[in-house]
């Protein structure tokens, strides 16, 4: 069994469509940047609220006069920047590391302006630069982080020499020191709380991204495994062609021999051998067609209902199950191009069900929105919990024979290549395996025939 050709050609577009459909829910690097930008937007709203409260408390509680109009202008700038950031977040263009860096630079510029208007480096809230550097270290590349450190240092030096002094109403040195310490304490609590909240959430986003990349590496290794098996299967199919043809010629010669022809038992055995050889030839041809060879014989236009009906009937004749309950509720019907490899995938699931339950196999097919859903049930012992936990991993099988577990591994990867889903669950009696295939991957026959 090999990966369907149409799935190989559509793999990249399916991945892109899947990300778009999830609206960034998949924890890939771009989605992680979106989440981090959203965290920065939330932090900026908190900064706006904190600045408003601090300005009002300083002006009216501590009775320290501030340039309210100018400081309100900075607050309005942050509000406008947040609205713009939300519009960017809703767009379809990817969020880059550079955009996160620019967002932090704007926040640093706003903080510098507020500090410039309220005492410069002597303002106890000057240590909020450390919060922005900490966020930068978590979100940005090392190059951008060091640029942010340099920018914050330059802003600090600037505020030492250039700032607008504020008139402190208290004349005693102890009162001024006490006021400064209280401001430092408020700044410390604010910075510590924000660092814990946002660093925890950023760390979760980064761990999701790392898990996604690890999953991609695992999938790449699995697909490489499939490619190697496909090459081996294709090579074996080529090699088997010659001995099968030789045996077929010898059988034809034997049938012409009068001595053998007169023996009815031998004649029946030769007929059965010839039928089995023809079956082997069809299997070899199917492998070659699925791997992209012998293309001209493999593409057959049909409908989904017809494809499933023929597939189930072919399996019923070749496997002769004791009892097969088949229900095809797919409606409305659609045109597709029959794919030999997809047929082999479904055959594999049927075979597994029959191995688990010789007495009964149930198959249902239906349409759910834009998907074909095939459920295969049996009344066997069900899946072991360890098998369900590692469903689709190669060589994970309870059959205890060499190569066990490769069937479901290949089924899962072929279904995934088509953009579908594969699941298995235990029922009260037996198990149920469900294949969910998008109709777009089955009905688009142009690529398949190209």
Image (cartoon, rainbow, N blue to C red):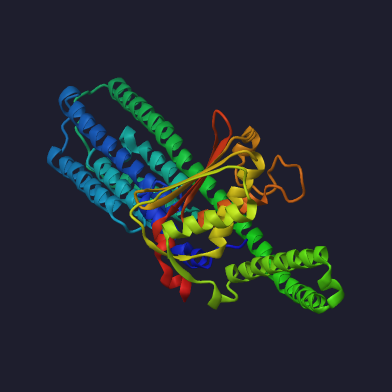
Observer-nearest residue: 102 or 82?
A: 82
Residue displayed at 31% across by 57% down: 92
- Residue 163 in view in this figure: yes
Observer-nearest residue: 328 or 168?
A: 328
List x then y, in percent, for residue 231: 67, 68
Residue displayed at 72% across by 74% down: 241
List x then y, in percent, for residue 260: 85, 72
Q: Left or right of 60: which side holds 125? A: right
Image quadrant containing the N terminus: bottom right
Q: Up-down: is 305 above or below 279? A: above
Furthest-left residue in this view: 69
- Residue 154 in view in this figure: no
Choose top left, top right, bottom left or bottom right for residue 336: bottom left
Furthest-right residue in this view: 259
Observer-nearest residue: 55 or 161?
A: 55
Observer-nearest residue: 352 or 258?
A: 258
List x then y, in percent, for residue 354: 63, 44
List x then y, in percent, for residue 428: 55, 28
């Amino acid at each position: 069994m090999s990966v369907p050709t149409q799935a190989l050609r559509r793999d990249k577009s399916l991945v892109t469509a899947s990300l778009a459909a999830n609206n960034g829910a998949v924890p890939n690097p771009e989605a992680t940047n979106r989440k981090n930008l959203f965290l920065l937007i939330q932090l900026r709203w908190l900064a706006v609220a904190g600045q408003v409260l601090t300005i009002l408390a300083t002006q009216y509680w501590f009775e320290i006069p501030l340039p309210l109009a100018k400081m309100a202008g900075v607050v309005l700038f942050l509000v406008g920047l947040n609205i713009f950031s939300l519009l960017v977040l809703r767009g379809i263009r990817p969020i880059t590391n550079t955009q996160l860096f620019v967002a932090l630079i704007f926040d640093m510029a706003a903080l510098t302006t507020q500090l410039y208007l309220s005492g410069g480096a002597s303002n106890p809230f000057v240590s909020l630069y450390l919060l922005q550097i900490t966020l930068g270290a978590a979100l940005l590349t090392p190059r951008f982080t060091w640029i942010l450190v340099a920018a914050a240092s330059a802003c600090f030096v600037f505020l030492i020499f250039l700032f607008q002094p504020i008139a402190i109403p208290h004349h005693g040195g102890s009162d001024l020191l006490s006021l400064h310490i209280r401001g430092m304490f408020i700044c410390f609590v604010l910075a510590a709380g924000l660092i814990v909240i946002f660093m925890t959430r950023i760390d979760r986003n980064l761990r999701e991204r790392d898990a996604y990349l690890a999953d991609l590496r695992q999938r790449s290794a699995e697909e490489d495994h499939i490619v190697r098996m496909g090459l081996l299967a294709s090579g074996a199919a080529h090699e088997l062609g010659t001995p099968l043809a030789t045996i077929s010629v010898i059988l034809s010669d034997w049938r012409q021999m009068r001595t053998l022809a007169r023996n009815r038992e031998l004649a029946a055995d030769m007929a059965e051998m010839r039928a089995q050889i023809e079956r082997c030839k069809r299997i070899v041809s199917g492998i070659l067609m699925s791997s992209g060879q012998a293309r001209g014989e493999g593409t057959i236009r049909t409908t989904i209902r017809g494809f499933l009906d023929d597939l189930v009937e072919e399996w019923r004749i070749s496997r002769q199950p004791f009892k097969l309950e088949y229900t095809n509720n797919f409606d409305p019907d659609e045109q597709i191009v029959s794919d030999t490899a997809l047929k082999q995938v479904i055959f594999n699931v049927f075979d597994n069900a029959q191995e688990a339950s010789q007495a009964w196999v149930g198959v249902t097919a239906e349409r759910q929105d834009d998907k074909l859903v095939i459920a295969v049930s049996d009344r066997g012992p069900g899946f072991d919990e360890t098998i369900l936990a590692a469903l689709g991993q190669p060589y994970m099988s309870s059959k205890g024979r060499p190569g066990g577990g490769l069937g479901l591994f290949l089924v899962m990867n072929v279904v995934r290549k088509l953009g579908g889903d594969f699941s298995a669950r235990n029922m009260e009696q037996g198990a149920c395996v469900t294949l969910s295939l998008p109709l777009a991957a089955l009905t688009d026959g142009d690529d398949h025939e190209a």
